[in-house]
Image: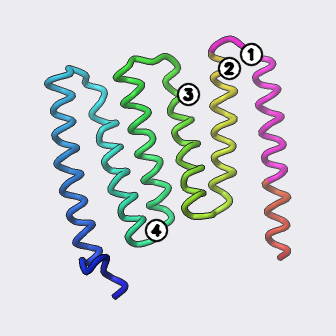
């Protein structure tokens, strides 16, 4: 049957996944608040487990949107947990890289080309922003490189769009 995996209904697996993820999420949130005394981690713990549940849902029911959302939430949860637990500088760089990585991984699973384009855009934006933040690039060079990159990126996307429409 198509609605079963190893003789177990897919909805039963998804319900069990929900309760396991919920119990682990609540335990780690309470652990981070009362034991580590870190009040910023609860959101990223929740993001990780919500993303894990969405990934399981996407694998069971072959949903592209749940795949991207799941990987995005998982990677944002891991990046946020790492950034706030280790108190790293340039926090937004890690979040942009997590979103870019989610796009690349979603492309590997779904083979949809817009994921790779979004991943390239987020990766280049994050990398250029990071170089500006650590004072490798000044504002004028940063803006000129970034605007040139955005112009070329949009031009390539428009060309690909018109080629797609003609077919």
Give the CA separation, mark 2 to mark 3.
Answer: 10 Å
Q: Quadrant of residue 55?
A: bottom left
Stretch in magenta = 134-156
- First in residue order: circle 2 vs circle 4: 4
Task: Indicate whether 122 appears above or below 32.
Answer: below
Which label is found at residue 93? 3
Which residue is at a point 36% across and 30% down the rendered structure image? Answer: 81
Residue designated by label 4: 63
Give the CA separation, mark 2 to mark 4.
Answer: 36 Å
Q: Are marks 1 and 2 in contact (CB under 8 Å)?
A: yes
Q: Quadrant of the N terminus?
A: bottom left
> How many neighbours does mark 4 have within 10 angstroms: few (below 14), some (14-19), or many (20 or more)?
some
Q: Are marks 2 and 4 in contact (CB under 8 Å)?
A: no
Q: In the current view of this chain or complex, which residue is farthest to the bottom? A: 1
Give the CA separation, mark 1 to mark 2.
Answer: 6 Å
> How many neighbours does mark 2 have within 10 angstroms: few (below 14), some (14-19), or many (20 or more)?
some
- First in residue order: circle 1 vs circle 2: 2
Q: In the current view of this chain or complex, which residue is farthest to the front? A: 6
Which residue is at a point 80% across and 19% down the rendered structure image? Answer: 141
Give the CA separation, mark 4 to mark 3.
Answer: 29 Å
Q: Could you say where residue 56 lies in the image, as x and y percent from the top left?
A: 36, 61
Q: Are marks 4 and 3 in contact (CB under 8 Å)?
A: no
Left or right side of 53 for 103? right
Task: Indicate whether 8 appears above or below 30.
Answer: below
- First in residue order: circle 1 vs circle 4: 4
Left or right side of 31 for 153? right
Q: Mark 4 falls on what kind of element?
A: loop
Residue designated by label 1: 137
Which label is found at residue 131? 2
Left or right side of 22 for 121? right
Nearer the observer, 104 or 164: 104
């Amino acid at each position: 049957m198509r609605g079963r995996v190893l003789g177990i209904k897919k909805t039963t697996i998804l319900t069990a996944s929900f309760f396991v993820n919920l119990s682990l999420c609540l335990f780690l949130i309470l652990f981070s608040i009362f034991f580590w005394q870190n009040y910023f981690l609860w959101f990223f713990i929740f993001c990780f487990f919500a993303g894990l549940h969405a990934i399981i849902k996407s694998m069971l029911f072959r949903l592209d949107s749940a795949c991207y959302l799941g990987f995005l939430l998982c990677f944002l949860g891991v990046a946020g947990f790492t950034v706030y637990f280790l108190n790293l500088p340039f926090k937004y760089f890690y979040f942009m890289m997590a979103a870019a990585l989610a796009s690349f991984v979603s492309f590997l699973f779904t083979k949809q080309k817009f994921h790779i384009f979004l991943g390239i855009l987020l990766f280049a934006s994050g990398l250029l922003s990071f170089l500006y933040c650590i004072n490798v690039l000044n504002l004028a060079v940063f803006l000129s490189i970034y605007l040139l990159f955005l112009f070329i990126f949009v031009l390539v996307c428009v060309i690909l769009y018109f080629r797609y429409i003609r077919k």
